[in-house]
Image (cartoon, rainbow, N blue to C red):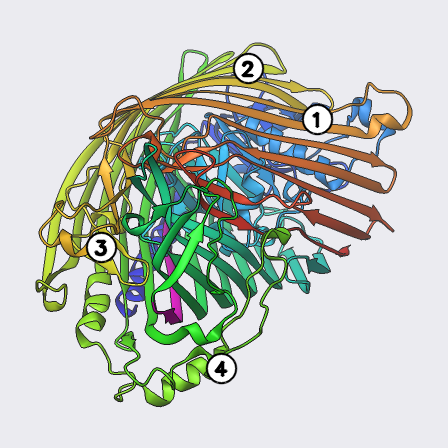
Amino acid sequence: MKNLLKNLSAFRGLLLGMLALAGSVCSVFAQQNTGNIKGQITGSSGEILPGASVFIKGTTYGVATDLSGNYTLLNVPVGEQIISVVYMGFKSSEQNVSVVGGRTVFLNVRMSSDDLNLSEVTVTAAQEGQRKALNQQRNSDNIKQVISADLMGRFPDLNVAESLQRLPGVTIGRNSSGEGATVQMRGTPGNFTNINVNGEQIMGTQEDGSRNAQLDVIPVNVLSSMEVVKTLTPDLDGDAIAGVINMKTPTASSLQPKLSVDLGAGYNNLRSNLNGIGNISAGKRFFANDKNPNGRLGIMATGSYFRTKNGYDEIRAQVWEANDYGKGSIYFPTDIRLLYVENQRTRTGTSATIDYSFSPTTNIIANVMYSNHFNELTRYRKRTRMQTARNVLTEQGEYTNSRGRGYNEIKSATEDNSSLNFNIQGETVIGSVKLDAGVFMNESEFVNRSGIYNFITGNIPLAISDISTDYLSAYGTDWKNNASLYTYNTVERDWWNTKGKNLTARLNASVPYKIGNNSAFFKAGAKVKRMHNQRSRPDETVVTTYAGAAAAGNLTNFSGNPEISSDLLDGNTNFGLGVDKDKTISFLDQNLGTALFPINVGATRNSIDSYYYDAVETVSSGYIMNRIQFNKLMFLVGARIEQTKVDYKGNVIQTDVDGNWVSTTPNQKKNDYIKVLPNIQFKYDLDKSSLLRAALTYGYSRPNFVDLVPGRVISLLSETVTDGNPELQPAFATNFDLMYEKYLSNLGIISGGLFYKKINKFQYNSVFALAGDEFEGAERYTGWRWFRTLNGNTANVYGMELNLQANLTFLPGILKGLSVLANYTYTHSNADAQFRKDLRLPGQAKHTANGSLSFNHKRLTMQANLNYNGSYTVLLGDQDATDVIRHDRIQIDANASYRITDKISIYAEAQNIGKAPQVDYFGERDRIYQKQFYSFWGRAGVKLRF
């Protein structure tokens, strides 16, 4: 940490020195036959207008305003010029300005509203947000979607992942409470998408070693907008085959102080508990003068707090084994588990931004953003096990086993997941060259402190007849309620930490020029980033097994609630007797290390050492690109080169013939590779409201950190073996994109696009049941699940995206207030893996869709939302019958708000109204693998705007 801060301080000093020097000499190098024009574009009420098109009339030279509505035109010929400004939803504006050689002149433009058919409809904050997003999207050089803060507020979404699921081509994975947490784009695995804050990557700290951060950590209220970039330009990192999600923090935009406050309370139906939420943001600009009419200094701060008690119900059957009971081979669910989870979650977030203008052409901006979620979790779990080979199929169709086992377990855990981001960046102009530079630091950490306390039966008779239901349940013994069957067994103090750090420094330079009457610019840059990801268990980790008298360890001494849940899984079953958490943990704490609970030194050492990895990647990159505007045609061409040096450390564990730990040997693997990434993009304006985009780009994606670690993790309680694969190669893709966009006069868009990706050496997750001959010592784990990540050969991904946003102002009467948002993505893939051909790429859903219908009348707004995620492969087995498939899912949400005054409004929101579960199945839908049930939740509150 000290070295990281020292390096950051050095980079910051270099940046400040460069900007100060550039600012002082700027006037010396300025060309006297050209000058600069700078200003801010605002609406009729003073609102900022990001994405406005500002250009010099009679030329192809123009720029788009930034998120604060600011623009800068460099190297404008001296004399009288006419500046044209175009922004959807406002009347076009033309302003005269006199350009003075070697100087910067200021021109602020206030646009007049032109809501056309919206004149009889109140323009809501969501529609204003839609207007900002569409203008930014319209003027971008590449294919992307933008979600502004106002547009995020249109939906009842608390975190970033929930908001992103509303966009075409985006699917999300959910956390243990049903909230969106991870993101996949265009039918590709999650590690094919980069997650950025202010343009730079933030690190993942998930237990599974994923590169990308969990987006349930970040509340939407600390952001100003999000970009989903689907075609990379050369000035963006190239390790993102699917694209980039870039979260932007807000900056102060007005000389008038701005304050917003949201306060709300909610209800979680599954756990019958209230929740609370609060958000605040404040900002103001200072020190306006003739040279900086919008203020030299801006200060902006946001804060967010959310606390809820949630959870989920679950059934798992993750071990299906093939056997022939006399009527042909079938798959039998050997291991069935019921879970009841309750969780107290607290999520906090804050951001602060300061920007300062040294001169009209030199400025600097610094931002810090911190987010955290903290879980206090209790999990009750019951399990029955019927070994497949010992089952007997009766004439009545019952599968019976005289030597079954039952397990009753409790887990107590805290999970602390945090992310800290700091960046400082600035820009200046020296002569005709625009320079921008920045440094970025991200530190992410996940601290898990959990204990798993397990009680086990002896051999008990069990039977099951229906193995095709989602609600598998063995019978024959009262394993749900009879405490006397169980004895204290294995305890695993499952403590672990993951840490991720990213330190980045970059420098870019661009030069505007002309080719005949066509404006152009040349841009080049360089970047260095060092990513460091670690996972470890502290020495407090313990594995122990109860060795005392059966009577003292009997569950009758530790019985808790006689019925944890009588309506588990939406009333389809019940849980039965639970373990008393306090008694169970206290008994262990008092006797750990004694004859009752002797520490299993070998198993503990194995747990600690096999879990460890330390991964460092250093990426050095450079690029060149050239953009030319030929009247209606924009042509961008360039290339990026990236060198990656990797250094991975793990442990190799040696065991004896009984599987006991013998020794730990550190293992290290180094590698480096270079990727060259050409890039060509076109944008053609068919008319004033429609355009066509095309792109040929190349990208690659690195495997997840943990997948590259040279080591093996063995879990006794889960009965799994997970191997790292240091020979994994990065995936490489050739991407073709074509997109048509039609912008509607009443703040809407109709768009349709096609995309194709040819991906070589894609990574996929593989799971097999060990036969005992796969590696040395595998016979000790026969029947256990064996997880690995492997390289496939080639995958072809084809897709189509359709998008519609429209305000139905052509309808009569109050129906003018109806608006519709709908999008649909179709994706098809075929992939060749090591053992199988013509597969669907893991993670690829064939169909995804969103629909939203809203109604706005005077001060009232109501909205209904639908999100559909199609099914996709989660894990690849050795054949179709053993793949794990995530079933398709439909979620319905609704929200409404009423503006009491221009500054005060009230709102109500409900999510997952249909109580949609998340379902995984094993090969076929009638073989349940995992089903999580969340029920519905909602909230209501008040919003204040000053």
Give the label on residue 615, or none: 3
* 904 left or right, relative to 430: right
Instruction: Identify which amino acid the numbered label 2 is placed on.
Output: Leu
| Labels 1 and 2: the sequence-earlier one | 2
Q: Quadrant of residue 297?
A: bottom right
| Residues drawn in magenta | 438-458
Callout 1–callout 2 Cβ contact below 8 Å: no
Instruction: Identify which amino acid the numbered label 1 is placed on.
Output: Leu
Q: Badge 2 is on which residue?
A: 691
Mark toward the viewer: 4 or 2: 4
Q: Badge 1 is on which residue?
A: 747
Callout 4–callout 2 Cβ contact below 8 Å: no
| Labels 3 and 1: the sequence-earlier one | 3
Q: Quadrant of residue 688?
A: top right
| Labels 4 and 2: the sequence-earlier one | 4
Crowding at dot 4, Cα within 10 Å, few <14 / some 14-19 / many 20+, comes out as few
Relative to 66, does residue 548 appear above or below in the rendering?
Answer: below
Instruction: Identify which amino acid the numbered label 3 is placed on.
Output: Ala
Q: CA distance from mark 1 to mark 2?
A: 16 Å
Mark toward the viewer: 1 or 4: 4
Mark toward the viewer: 3 or 4: 4
Relative to 186, does residue 672 appear above or below in the rendering?
Answer: below
